[in-house]
Image (tube, rainbow, N blue to C red):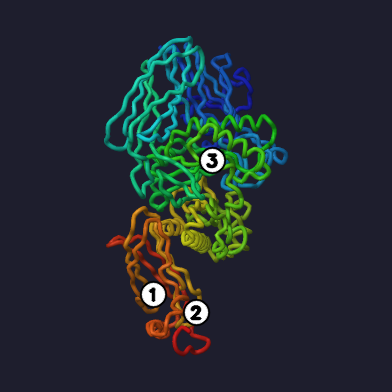
């Protein structure tokens, strides 16, 4: 659909000029056209309607007002919820005013915000970040476009559901929103179709009595045992399409049958524990430019990174992303769009509660969503706004777990904001760290294209606008700038990859005390310099491959002995094997040393129970071995003492048959001993 657009602060259509309008394609956000504005007007010329009633469904960010010629049709607040408008049947000009005003700096923004937009309103991964310029390049517009449709006297407007387990199958509560011009009786046909597999359909009909006006009907449908929706690594995500049909009108919603629970911090999916291997995602800052093809690509990249879960960070994203996760068997932790501080007045609280219910109503049909979270890092709202929003979500959705907040204590950043990456050994954020990571520069070619002459030598003001954090990069992480942009990129990406690898291996070896992780973050949502492991064009940084290798469902993990040692010292301290699979495994674990010379270090067969994490080698235990077993240890020590000094890699591989599940590599530098060693290790 195309519309005429004009950025203009007018309050009503009567105040608008006749000149300056241009045609745009919907969906549309004016920032994508290079326009910096707070109000945008859309004008459409509509012919007469053929049906009894005519409607518009549109997605506006953030305040919407609509007129038909001079008749005011209604107003809307929010960005993620579809806005339904009844339009006149007669030919008319439809006027839509979309307002996304900047909130007053210092008094309202950033600590007393009123617009419920999450990361679209304030975040350190949007243009300007946390600086005073952090509201530039806003998200206003008709980001989801506009759909015009006609109905009879009774309009079928919205369909959602909740599926409850019963002993012999499923009980589905179906919620239908309808609008009738007058009281009447109607017949509704309901059908359940397999969406991504072959199987039988199920059909039923209901006759219902409607009163005049807008109403939501609750219908109950008992269904037999049906194939479950499951995560990709341990089953198939059987997906159905629920369809309602009335008087020629048809609505559909996705549905997947699965059970959810929490036990000692663990997610229990379909009666079995899931160790969550996840990341945070903000797919884009401007939803109008995000397509179903983009969503399919992002879901594929998540699976290729061996992740089974993703946290949609502090916002609701494009519906296509949830559809892709439904199909691909990816779990979604879904945040409500509250990020940092908000006002505490009654109007804001009431609107947040209303939108929280709308989130469940419009996104709750997706089986991929397993958790709602009311507020991300809520600062002064932690014990006021966050509990009220969480209570509203629980009331609207009795099936899913609900968190009041994703708190700062769950977001450990050793090696970036504080401490050293070795501090991950204390398991900060346990039992489920939901943010950790480090920034890394995207590739040099992209930086030069985005930053222009400010790319090198760096103009830090420009870099900071693009989210770069120099204090943490240089003074906490200790990243060297180097003599060129390419060197800086390499140093930065190496550090990010090292931190990700170290953190995830440490968390996974602690399985049980740790029930999963959500790394921060997956992809840059604009041309920024962020914690992402994929740049805005989805080109991987080194961190992507570190995340991928550390997140394999079956992992072999080396605990180094030291990073620098005299020739003859042990090359590692512990070897672990971790399985997140629900079946037993027989693995062949091999070890070798590569460097100035290559040296095989042994091979063993390891039988793992389902979901087991086990230390299969500990050099300290060998030091305590009986004397008759020390000969082999002394022989190994003698071989190591013959190595030439230099940089080596210790490589561990875990195979099931011919399938390579995991490879882990750590580096050790062997030096000439300061004192000649005699005998074995001890």
Residue 135 as seen in the image, left or right of residue 288 = right
Res. 458 image quadrant: bottom right
Q: CA distance from mark 1 to mark 3?
A: 48 Å
Question: In this figure, which residue is indicated by the disc labeled 2?
Answer: 565
Residue 595 percent across, percent down from the top left: 40, 76
Q: CA distance from mark 2 to mark 1?
A: 14 Å
Residues packed near mark 2 inside 10 Å, few (<14), some (14 to 19) or many (20 plus):
some
Q: Eyeballing the image, is 215 above or below 413?
A: above
Mark 1 and mark 3 lie on one chain; the one further toward the N terminus is: 3
The disc placed on residue 402 is: 3
Q: Nearer the viewer, residue 384 or 675?
A: 384
Residue sitting at 37 percent across and 71 percent down?
A: 591
Element assignment for label 1: strand
Res. 269 image quadrant: top left
Mark 3 and mark 2 lie on one chain; the one further toward the N terminus is: 3
Element assignment for label 3: strand
Question: In this figure, which residue is indicated by the disc labeled 1?
Answer: 593
Q: Nearer the viewer, residue 273 or 435?
A: 273
Residue sitting at 40 percent across and 53 percent down?
A: 306
């Amino acid at each position: 659909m195309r519309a005429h657009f004009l950025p203009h602060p007018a309050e009503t259509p009567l105040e608008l000029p006749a000149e300056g309008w241009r045609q745009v394609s919907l969906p549309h956000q004016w920032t994508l056209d290079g326009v910096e504005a707070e109000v945008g007007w859309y004008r459409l010329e509509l012919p007469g309607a053929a049906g009894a009633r005519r409607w518009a469904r549109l997605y506006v960010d953030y305040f919407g007002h609509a007129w038909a010629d001079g008749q005011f049709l209604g107003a809307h607040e929010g960005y993620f919820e579809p806005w339904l408008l009844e339009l006149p049947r007669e030919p008319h000009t439809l006027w839509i005013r979309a307002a996304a005003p900047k909130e007053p700096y210092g008094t309202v923004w950033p600590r007393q915000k009123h617009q419920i937009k999450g990361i679209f309103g304030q975040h350190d991964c949007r243009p300007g970040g946390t600086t005073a310029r952090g509201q530039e390049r806003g998200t206003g517009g008709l980001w989801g476009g506009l759909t015009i449709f006609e109905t009879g006297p009774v309009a079928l407007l919205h369909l959602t559901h909740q599926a409850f387990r019963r002993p012999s199958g499923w009980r589905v509560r179906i919620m239908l929103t309808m609008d009738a011009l007058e009281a009447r009786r109607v017949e509704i046909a309901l059908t359940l179709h397999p969406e991504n597999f072959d199987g039988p359909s199920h059909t039923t009909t209901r006759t219902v009595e409607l009163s005049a006006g807008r109403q939501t009907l609750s219908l109950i449908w008992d269904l037999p045992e049906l194939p479950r929706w499951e995560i990709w690594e341990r089953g198939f995500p059987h997906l159905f399409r629920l369809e309602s049909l009335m008087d020629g009108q048809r609505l559909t919603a996705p549905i997947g049958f699965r059970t959810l629970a929490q036990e000692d911090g663990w997610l229990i999916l379909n009666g079995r524990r899931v160790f969550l291997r996840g990341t945070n995602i903000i797919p884009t800052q401007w939803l109008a430019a995000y397509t179903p093809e983009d969503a399919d690509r992002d879901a594929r990249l998540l699976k290729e990174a061996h992740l089974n879960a993703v946290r949609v960070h502090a916002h609701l994203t494009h519906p296509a992303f949830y559809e892709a996760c439904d199909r691909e068997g990816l779990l979604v932790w879904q945040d409500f769009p509250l990020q940092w501080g908000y006002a505490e007045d009654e109007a804001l609280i009431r609107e947040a509660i209303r939108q929280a219910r709308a989130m469940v109503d419009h996104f709750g049909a997706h089986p991929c969503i397993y958790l709602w979270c009311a507020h991300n890092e809520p600062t002064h709202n932690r014990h006021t706004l966050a509990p009220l929003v969480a209570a509203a979500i629980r009331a609207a959705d009795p099936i899913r777990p609900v968190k009041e907040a994703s708190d700062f204590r769950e977001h450990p950043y050793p090696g970036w904001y504080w401490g050293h990456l070795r501090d991950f050994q204390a398991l900060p954020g346990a039992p489920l760290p939901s943010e950790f990571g480090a920034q890394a520069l995207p590739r040099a070619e992209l930086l030069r294209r985005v930053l222009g002459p400010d790319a090198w030598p760096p103009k830090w003001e420009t870099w900071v606008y693009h989210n770069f954090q120099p204090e943490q990069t240089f003074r906490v992480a200790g990243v060297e700038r180097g003599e060129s942009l390419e060197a800086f990129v390499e140093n930065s990406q190496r550090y990010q990859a090292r931190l990700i690898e170290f953190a995830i291996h440490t968390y996974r070896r602690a399985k049980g005390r740790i029930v999963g992780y959500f790394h921060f973050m997956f992809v840059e949502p604009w041309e920024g310099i962020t914690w992402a492991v994929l740049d805005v064009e989805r080109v991987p940084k080194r961190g992507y491959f570190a995340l991928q290798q550390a997140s394999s469902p079956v992992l072999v993990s080396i605990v180094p002995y030291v990073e620098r040692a005299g020739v003859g010292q042990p090359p590692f301290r512990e070897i672990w094997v971790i399985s997140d699979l629900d079946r037993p495994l027989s693995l062949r674990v091999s070890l070798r040393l590569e460097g100035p010379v290559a040296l095989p270090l042994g091979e063993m067969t390891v039988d793992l129970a389902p979901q087991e994490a086990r230390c299969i080698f500990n050099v300290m235990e060998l030091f305590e071995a009986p004397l008759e077993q020390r000969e082999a240890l002394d022989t190994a020590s003698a071989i190591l003492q013959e190595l030439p000094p230099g940089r080596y890699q210790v490589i561990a591989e875990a195979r099931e048959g011919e399938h390579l599940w995991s490879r882990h590599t750590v580096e050790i530098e062997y030096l000439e001993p300061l004192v000649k060693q005699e005998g074995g290790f001890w």
